[in-house]
Amino acid sequence: MIQLLYIAIFSEMGLILTLVFRSPLRKFVIMGLDRVKRGRGPVVVKTVSATIVVLFFSNVYTIVNIQNRKMEAGALNPTDEILMAMNLLQASLLGFMIFLALMIDRLHHYIRELRLLRKAMEAAKKQNRESECEAKAKEAEAAEAKAEALRKQSEGSLLQYDHLLEDNQSLRNQLESIDQNLSQSGGKKTM
């Protein structure tokens, strides 16, 4: 049984290392854990976990019984010492195995959450970029409309300026003609 516990512990440690560090196997391990957590997988995992927990508590109970015998008798015989050491080792390995299984479950959960958060963040960034593009497009349209309005206002001012120049020229011409008329009529009176 101890060899099986060591194999299980080392395989769990390998899974944890695969989940912690980015490697090509990480994706396959995550997909495998996802499949285990679907369908009948959770029932099997819970059954195996319950069996391991029962074995753990059985070993702890045996250790406590041996300790009680030691208290009553004052010393342990060699057989009880070997049983105590074996049960203590098995309980330690089972406890460590349970701990590693919980770590694998939590790591898998956090990696899935991280993946979902990254997808949500990418979607938010994309939406933010789209809204910024839309805002810049609206600003560009507003700037074009303002430029068009200023161009029309400039054309209107230019037409008004041309009209004022024409009026000014006509008033000068009238003033010159009046001046000429006055100078001709003033010249006739002096003669």
Image: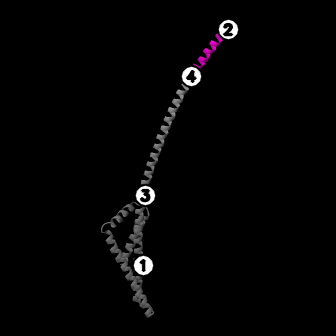
Question: In this figure, which colouring scheme has been used for the structure?
Answer: one colour
Task: Left or right? Give the position of 141 relative to 54.
Answer: right
Mark nearer the N terminus (1 vs 2) = 1
Residue mark closest to the camera, 3 vs 2:
2
For marks 4 and 1 on the same chain, the one whose residue lies earlier in the sequence: 1
The count of marks equals 4
Quarter of the image with the C terminus is top right
Residue drawn at point x = 52 percent, y = 27 percent: 159
The reply, left or right, for residue 12 in relation to residue 182 is left
Element under label 3?
Answer: helix
* Residue type at tag 2: Lys
Q: Which mark is residue 118?
A: 3
Q: Nearer the viewer, mark 3 or mark 1?
A: 3
The CA span between labels 3 and 1 is: 38 Å
Residue at left 60%, top 14%? Answer: 177
- Whole-percent x, y for residue 69 in the image: 42, 91
Which of label 4 and label 3 is nearer to you?
A: 4
Asked if one can make out residue 76 in the rendered structure from this viewpoint, the answer is no
Q: Is residue 189 magenta?
A: yes
Can you say whether 49 is above or below 75 in the image? above
Q: Which mark is residue 167?
A: 4
Q: Look at label 1 and name its amino acid.
A: Ser
The amino acid pointed to by label 4 is: Asp
Task: For marks 1 and 2, give the one nearer the viewer.
Answer: 2
